Amino acid sequence: MPQRILWVFYMAIQLKNVSKIYRMGDVEVNALNQLNISVKKGSFTAIIGPSGSGKSTAMNIIGSLDTPTEGNVLISGTNIKDFNQNQLAAFRGKKIGFVFQHFNLIPSLTALENVMIPMLFQGVPLNERMKRAEELLTNIGLGDRMNHLPKELSGGQMQRVAIARALANNPEIILADEPTGNLDSKTGQEILALLKNLNKKGKTIVVITHDEDIKKYCNVVHYIKDGKLEKTWTKR
């Protein structure tokens, strides 16, 4: 098998010379500037940068929530640069699970119902949605809380529900945006340990953060600044 094809096979994510320019009237903001990042399948990778570094824009592009102005974005070998919004939505629904700093749970729905939602959009039958949601919540230690509303859960429990929701459609990639940002240090460590366990089971984990402490969980850390890759750290 040619080396180039092997490289694509092992890569979950590739950003190739990706630039993103936001235009506000006559002003142009270069959020990303020729950014190159590769994430191997099955790795635990962090993208670290200060506020304004472009890491949130990079997350949106990796997660197919936005498209680049220039460059190519390959997810599991598929170039999504020219996908329309419907194609992007269908693609990310199958390939990527999201975990957010603010949990983004629907307040009026139980933990079980929140986890079932992504499967609804993929056309999964009700009985199957319920069974899988129950299994996911039980596996992360919330089997006794699945009928509780978000307001009846602690911050750590809400983040666990969010992780279960991210796993609902069995995506290849879990993309976590500051997943410990609203948690105390002990609970944050528990959430990172849970993500690490998912990584050991084969999920590709990508965490977007400003927190250097995450480094001990990672195989690779990409540091970005001013929309560019500043350096890459690899665990030895």
Image (cartoon, rainbow, N blue to C red):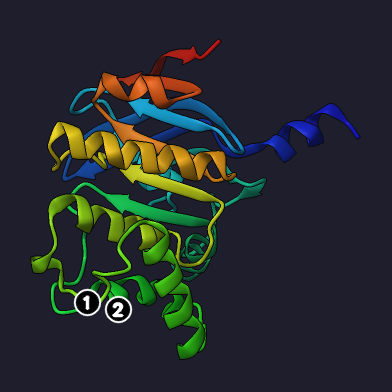
Looking at the picture, which amino acid does disc 1 mark?
Thr
Q: Which residue is mark 2?
A: 113
Where residue 197 sits in the image (x, y, percent)?
47, 41
Classify residue 223 as left or right of residue 219: left
Residue at horizontal 28%, vertical 19%?
Answer: 212
Classify residue 26 as left or right of residue 115: left
Q: Is residue 172 above or below residue 230?
A: below
Q: Is residue 228 visible?
A: no
Q: Nearer the viewer, residue 1 or 167?
A: 167
Where residue 180 sits in the image (x, y, percent)?
22, 39
At numbered mark 2, what does the secondary structure look like: helix, strand or loop?
A: helix
Badge 1 local density, few (<14 within 10 Å), some, or many (20+)? many
Give the position of the C terminus as an image quadrant. Answer: top right
- Quadrant for residue 146, please give it: bottom left
* Proximity of marks 1 and 2: CB atoms separated by less than 8 Å: yes
Residue at horizontal 38%, vertical 76%?
Answer: 116
Residue at horizontal 48%, vertical 32%?
Answer: 44
Looking at the picture, which amino acid does disc 2 mark?
Glu
Which numbered disc covers residue 110? 1
Q: Nearer the viewer, residue 12 or 80?
A: 12
Q: Is residue 11 above or below residue 98?
A: above
Where residue 167 sits in the image (x, y, percent)?
45, 60
At numbered mark 1, what does the secondary structure look like: helix, strand or loop?
A: loop
Residue at horizontal 73%, vertical 40%?
Answer: 9
> Marks 1 and 2, Cα distance to the nearest angstrom?
5 Å
Where residue 126 sits in the image (x, y, percent)?
45, 89
Q: Is residue 93 above or below residue 69?
A: below
Q: Residue furthest right?
A: 1
Give the position of the N terminus as an image quadrant. Answer: top right
